[in-house]
Image (spheres, coloured by chain):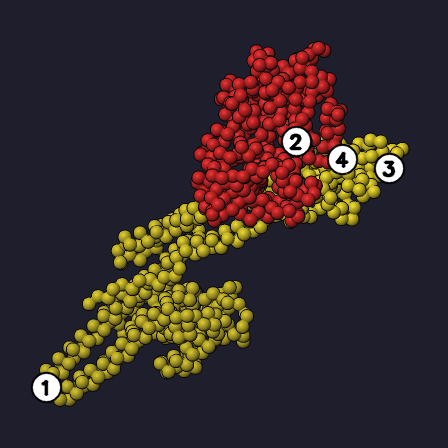
């Protein structure tokens, strides 16, 4: 029975998020523009109609003459034509003699503080704007200032201000719609590389774990890089599993065949004494086989951990010490043949202690098996790197094989009674999983050194 | 249809003091028992306006209208008094003195009214949605066809000036126009003329030189022309002239060729009016198609084709409803204009 494929967890769609952001932006922007446009419209309308008002007041002031010592105004129709440019507004005007007497026009309140210029007021219950013009006379029979006040209701101003605001808002609305259309287009074109990747993946065979070759924009290259690294890791794990299974089947099949042959021999043996000897060998062999199986599984686990476990901050010296302790236990080696060469200060790196200890144990085991004692575990620090190295006095791996040692020796080692011979392959895998490397070297004092080199993390603690 | 006519003199007799302004005539229209009442004050002659009221009441049978006919200046005075709350307000005012209407609106005495019909009016016939031009009446010259043959009749103001120019002209003392002190409409026409063209100065000068007569009221002037007392009357309201010419063969009517002033009587709803809905309905009726037909029949809407067969619109000068009309009502402007007038037409 096959489960239905679980749908990917969904968050709000990009289009919706963009839509919300745009609506917010447009609403806030629209409100800001509306306020600004209203303020601008009001000031523009005020300036426009103030000029008409002042012009009309000046025209009336210009029409003032003196006749026999009395103020006479020949009210110019042109002044009212000017004011009628605000067609629906009421007009109020007054011409006041220096003694405060009304010469002509409406009997309205005098301008506040005798100011000359413009001020706000009201006329028959409607808000109005007033302009004051003054005319000074200094004649023999008349001296003083004649005040002309012209006022007009503000209907046309409000209308013009509203019109300017409306026009501005129409522009904002248009711009908003255009921006929305552009945003939709932009999202579509921005997401098109993702759809391309989707198509490439859909067309792939399940076994194809090679990196994606699709050209993508810089913004998505991170995602593709991560995807490629992820696939690479899976690829490595699959490869490791395949190698392990191949090795394990190869290495376990032979001892089991030997066991079966001995069991057959034991079954056919009639001499009880020799039969007992064969059974003793069978026992010894099966114990070894058990240990071998343990080791194989252990190694599989190490390699799996190396690729999956999170890395912790740790001191490489503890790795060396734990290696020594566990190797003592495994090999029963004495201090004379296994030495530690540790610095005084901690040597920090990011790593998985268990994997690193296993890697070191492998190196030590190799040194014991193929090298010449004494074996030294050294921890050190170079520029940008830290290392844990295992040295012995033997000739080590020939230099022409250093570059492919981990492959070559996996195959060559074959089966022994106590080791699966996966040593260098595991060490290499662990080093790679720690973004480091397996390095060989011949130290100046002679012998051979294999080292796990890891990137340094500095001295902060 | 019953309507009572009371003459101003009779009414004045009934009043304790003659100082109180009073209507020239009063008429009641519509069923006695009608639910709604409306008081309409106007300057239009009752006889001329009656068919219009009858036609409107045919569409509004629930309404009873009292029509008061007032002299234009009196109408303004009572409307301004009503605006101050010192006199009972009418529900609707229709006046030929549109400058005074504009002043009433400017002083905040009107109530705005908006309808599809008022919205369709051109800007010069609607100010602030408070005063509306409801008629279309030319200012014309009227002549006596018996005494002034059609061929000799003036076609323009220049013709009139030419007739008055000879020293021994027979038109001396026999040309009449409105007394602008007594007639608000006459003042409006004269002032519009003074704004319109320079011929006005020459005309005033010619009137003064030949002893032209300034007198009151359309009906009286036209009667005097018909009787031959006056040969020519200048700036007579076309609605009255054409109405009389239709009945009286002695009356000839000419629209001046260089330009013809066209007056649209103003209708406004006073702020203090009690029945603004009925008033609005009446305005809508006047602006409606059936209303227009009745007004044309009453010569209150100019039939351009009949009066000016080869007229084009450019010589028609509608007097716009605009605050510019306030200029003529300015105390000093008016005083100056009347002083000029007085020099021409000295009081006997």
Image-quadrant location for residue A108:
top right
Callout in the foreground (2, 3)? 2
Give the drawing colour for chain A: yellow
Callout in the foreground (4, 1)? 4
Q: Which residue is mark 2?
A: B183
x, y percentage for residue A440? 41, 65
Q: CA distance from mark 2 to mark 4?
A: 30 Å
Q: Of callouts 4 and 1, which one flags the residue occurring earlier in the amino acid sequence?
A: 4
Q: CA distance from mark 2 to mark 3?
A: 38 Å
In the rendered view, would you say B170 is above or below B44?
above
Q: Of callouts 1 and 3, which one flags the residue occurring earlier in the amino acid sequence?
A: 3
Relative to residue A186, is residue A50 drawn left or right?
Answer: right
Could you confirm whether marks 2 and 1 are on the same chain? no
Q: Which residue is mark 1?
A: A270
Q: Which residue is mark 4?
A: A61
x, y percentage for residue A330? 35, 81
In the rendered view, would you say A429 is above or below B323?
below
Q: CA distance from mark 4 to mark 1?
A: 149 Å
Image-quadrant location for residue B177:
top right
Chain of the residue under the numbered disc 1 shown in the image? A
Callout in the foreground (1, 3)? 3
- In this rendering, the count of numbered labels is 4
Which mark is on residue A143? 3
Chain of the residue under the numbered disc 4 shown in the image? A
Chain of the residue under the numbered disc 3 shown in the image? A
- Pointer 2 local density, CA inside 10 Å: few below 14, some 14–19, many at least 20: many
Q: CA distance from mark 1 to mark 3?
A: 159 Å
Give the drawing colour for chain B: red
Relative to residue A92, is residue A210 drawn left or right?
Answer: left
Relative to residue B80, is residue A296 drawn left or right?
Answer: left
Q: Are marks 1 and 3 in contact (CB under 8 Å)?
A: no
């Amino acid at each position: 029975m096959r489960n239905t494929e679980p749908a990917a967890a969904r968050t709000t769609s990009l289009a919706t998020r963009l839509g919300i952001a745009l609506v917010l932006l447009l609403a806030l922007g629209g409100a800001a523009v509306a306020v600004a446009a209203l303020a601008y419209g009001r000031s523009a309308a005020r300036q426009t109609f103030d000029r008409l008002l002042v012009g009309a007041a000046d025209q009336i002031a210009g029409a003032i003459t003196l006749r026999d010592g009395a103020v006479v105004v020949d009210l110019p129709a042109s002044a009212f034509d000017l004011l009628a440019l605000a067609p629906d507004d009421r007009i109020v005007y007054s011409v006041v003699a220096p003694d405060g007497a009304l010469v002509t026009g409406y009997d309205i309140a005098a301008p506040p503080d005798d100011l000359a210029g413009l001020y706000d007021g009201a006329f028959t219950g409607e808000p109005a704007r007033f302009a004051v013009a003054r005319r000074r006379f200094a004649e023999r029979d008349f001296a003083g200032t004649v005040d002309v006040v012209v006022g007009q209701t503000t209907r046309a101003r409000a209308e013009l201000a509203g019109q300017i605001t409306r026009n501005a808002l129409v522009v904002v609305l248009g711009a908003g719609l255009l921006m929305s259309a552009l945003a939709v287009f932009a999202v579509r074109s921005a997401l098109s590389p993702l759809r391309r990747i989707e198509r490439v993946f859909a067309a792939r065979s399940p076994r194809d774990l090679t990196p994606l070759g699709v050209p993508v924009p810089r913004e998505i290259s991170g995602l593709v890089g991560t995807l490629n690294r992820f696939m690479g890791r899976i690829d490595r794990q699959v490869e490791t599993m395949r190698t392990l299974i191949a090795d394990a089947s190869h290495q376990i099949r032979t001892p089991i065949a030997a066991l079966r042959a001995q069991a057959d021999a034991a079954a056919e043996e009639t001499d009880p004494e020799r039969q007992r000897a064969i059974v003793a060998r069978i026992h010894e062999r099966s114990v070894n086989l058990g240990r071998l199986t343990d080791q194989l599984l252990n190694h599989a686990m190490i390699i799996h951990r190396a690729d999956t476990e999170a890395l912790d901050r740790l001191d490489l010296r503890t790795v060396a010490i734990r290696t020594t302790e566990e190797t003592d236990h495994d090999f029963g080696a004495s201090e004379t043949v296994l030495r530690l060469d540790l610095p005084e200060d901690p040597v920090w790196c990011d790593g998985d202690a268990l994997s690193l200890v296993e890697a070191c144990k492998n190196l030590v085991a190799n040194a014991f098996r193929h090298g010449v004692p004494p074996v030294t575990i050294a921890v050190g620090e170079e520029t940008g790197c830290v290392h844990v190295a295992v040295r012995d006095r033997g000739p080590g791996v020939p230099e022409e094989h250093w570059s492919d040692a981990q492959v070559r020796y996996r195959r060559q080692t074959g089966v022994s009674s106590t080791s699966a011979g996966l040593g260098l392959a595991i060490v290499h895998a662990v080093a790679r999983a720690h973004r480091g490397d397996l390095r060989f070297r011949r130290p100046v004092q002679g012998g051979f050194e294999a080292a796990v080199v890891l990137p340094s993390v500095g001295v902060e603690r | 249809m019953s309507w009572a006519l009371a003459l101003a003199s009779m009414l004045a007799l009934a009043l304790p003091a003659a100082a109180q302004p009073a209507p020239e005539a009063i008429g009641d229209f519509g069923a006695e028992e009608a639910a709604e009442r409306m008081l309409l004050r106007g300057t239009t002659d009752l006889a001329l306006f009656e068919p219009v009221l009858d036609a409107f009441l045919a569409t509004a049978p629930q309404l009873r209208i009292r029509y008061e006919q007032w002299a234009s200046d009196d109408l303004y005075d009572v409307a301004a008094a009503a605006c101050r709350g010192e006199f009972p307000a009418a529900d609707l005012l229709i006046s030929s003195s549109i400058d005074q209407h504009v002043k009433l609106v400017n002083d905040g005495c009107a109530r705005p009214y908006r309808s599809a019909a008022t919205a369709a009016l051109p800007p010069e016939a609607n100010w602030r949605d408070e005063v509306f031009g409801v008629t279309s009446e030319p200012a014309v010259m009227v002549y006596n066809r018996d005494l002034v043959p059609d061929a000799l009749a003036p076609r323009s103001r220049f013709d009139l000036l030419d007739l008055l120019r000879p020293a021994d002209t027979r038109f001396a003392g026999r040309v009449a126009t409105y007394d602008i002190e007594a007639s608000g409409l006459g003042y409006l026409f004269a002032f519009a003329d003074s704004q319109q063209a320079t011929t006005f100065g020459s005309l005033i000068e010619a009137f003064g030189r030949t002893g032209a007569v300034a007198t009151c009221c359309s009906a009286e002037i036209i009667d005097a022309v018909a009787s031959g007392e006056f040969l020519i009357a200048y700036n007579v309201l076309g609605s009255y002239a054409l109405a009389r010419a239709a009945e009286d063969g002695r009356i000839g009517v000419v629209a001046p060729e260089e330009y013809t002033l066209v007056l649209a009587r103003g209708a406004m709803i006073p702020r203090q009016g009690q029945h603004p809905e009925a008033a609005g309905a009446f305005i809508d009726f006047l602006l409606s198609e059936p209303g227009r037909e009745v007004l044309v029949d009453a010569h209150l809407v100019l039939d351009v084709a009949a009066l000016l067969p080869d007229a084009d619109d450019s010589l028609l000068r509608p007097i716009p409803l605009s605050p510019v009309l306030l200029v003529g009502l300015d105390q000093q402007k008016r005083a100056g204009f009347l002083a000029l007038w007085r020099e021409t037409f000295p009081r006997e």
